Amino acid sequence: MLKQFAILLIILVFPLFSFSQNNEKNVKVMTYNIWNGFDWGKDATRRAKLQHWVNTQQPDVFALEELCMYTPEKLQADAKSWGHNYSVLLKESGYSVGLTSRYPIEVKEKMIEGMHHGALHCKTSGIDFLVVHLHPGSISRRREEMKILLVKLEQIKAENTKYIVLGDFNAHSPFDADLYLPDGDLLTRLRNSNEGKGLDGNIDNGNLDYSVISGFLSAPLYDVTRNFSNGIEERGSFPAMALAPVNNESHEQLRARLERIDYILVSAELDANCTNAKVCNGEDNWYLSDHYPVIAEFRFDK
């Protein structure tokens, strides 16, 4: 009797379990600034190593920044190397951004006007993506770009509850404010290099500027990385060890000025369904770029 009951229970429950699994979707998202398009196309070795690493991670959607000297065909070749059949390049000049995906991509807008490097709005896997690379050297310009992107975000929100703004923001988060030492290596270096520049530099009144990321958070967008990490040692996305020989710095000096400027910021629905997020700043990524990649994983109903 007990055996028959157990069999009946399995018959009744298993279809429900299968139905639940079949109606769930897992999406792994990554963003990576690849550093001057692998030295403007000259560093084939680093390109091949990064392709290999990305393939081991198996992202479903991948945003890239600093696609210098890239064509749509070249980006598509990269995409194929990590199993993606779809890709979009913002532009073929300067510092471009791009998106590759396991799923078809709908290009919504290529944003150039008012943007330093530009931004790319695409929809794939049911999610709206804004790939960004904000101005590297001016707080005022980043604030202007943020305002443009927030207008675009309002348009996206009117049509979709799943959206992500990701990439290299070149800006600091208020969630990290207590992680930067007031007189540490990072702030000392930035104060010296930005002296007299005001808001046309990267220091505001002697301190880091948190207004740009605060603006995105007030949209609201949600910073998934902070929920799964502690300390700048885990969150730091720049500089990577590849800069050691370039700047004549030791690994210790680079670690001492770690900062987080790369983000995956998401809608409330995606934040509630985020299962993991991290900055991959371990040894595997020390020499693949001057930035470290950020990964976030989501599970939600189809």
Image (tube, helix red, strand yellow):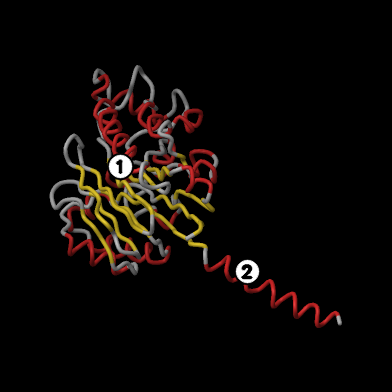
Q: Nearer the viewer, residue 115 or 183?
A: 115
Assign the N terminus to one quadrant of the image: bottom right
Q: Nearer the viewer, residue 147 or 50?
A: 147
Mark 2, Cα crowd under 10 Å, few <14 / some 14-19 / many 20+, is: few
Query: What amino acid type is highlighted by mark number 1?
Result: Asn
Relative side of 252 to 3, left or right = left
| Residue under numbered circle 2 | 17
Q: Position of residue 276 (x, y in %)?
A: 52, 52
Relative side of 190 to 36, left or right = right
- Give SS at disc 1: loop
- Give SS at disc 2: helix
Seen from this angle, which residue lies furthest left? 93
- Asked whether the residues under the numbered discs 2 and 1 touch, taking CB atoms below 8 Å apart as contact, a structural biologist would say no
Query: What amino acid type is highlighted by mark number 2?
Result: Phe
Relative side of 241 to 75, left or right = right
Q: Position of residue 271 (x, y in %)?
A: 50, 45
Kindly report the distance in space between the C-alpha atoms of the residues bearing marks 2 and 1. 57 Å
The label nearer to you, 2 versus 1, is 2
Q: Position of residue 258 (x, y in %)?
A: 42, 38
Identity of the residue drawn at 53% across and 47% down: 272
Q: Which mark is residue 248?
A: 1
Q: Is residue 37 above or below residue 7?
A: above
Q: Position of residue 286 (x, y in %)?
A: 39, 52
Relative side of 10 to 172, left or right = right
- Of mark 2 and mark 1, the one earlier in the sequence is 2
Q: Nearer the viewer, residue 124 or 78?
A: 124
Mark 1, Cα crowd under 10 Å, few <14 / some 14-19 / many 20+, is: few
Q: Is residue 137 above or below residue 93?
A: above
Identity of the residue drawn at 27% across and 61% down: 47
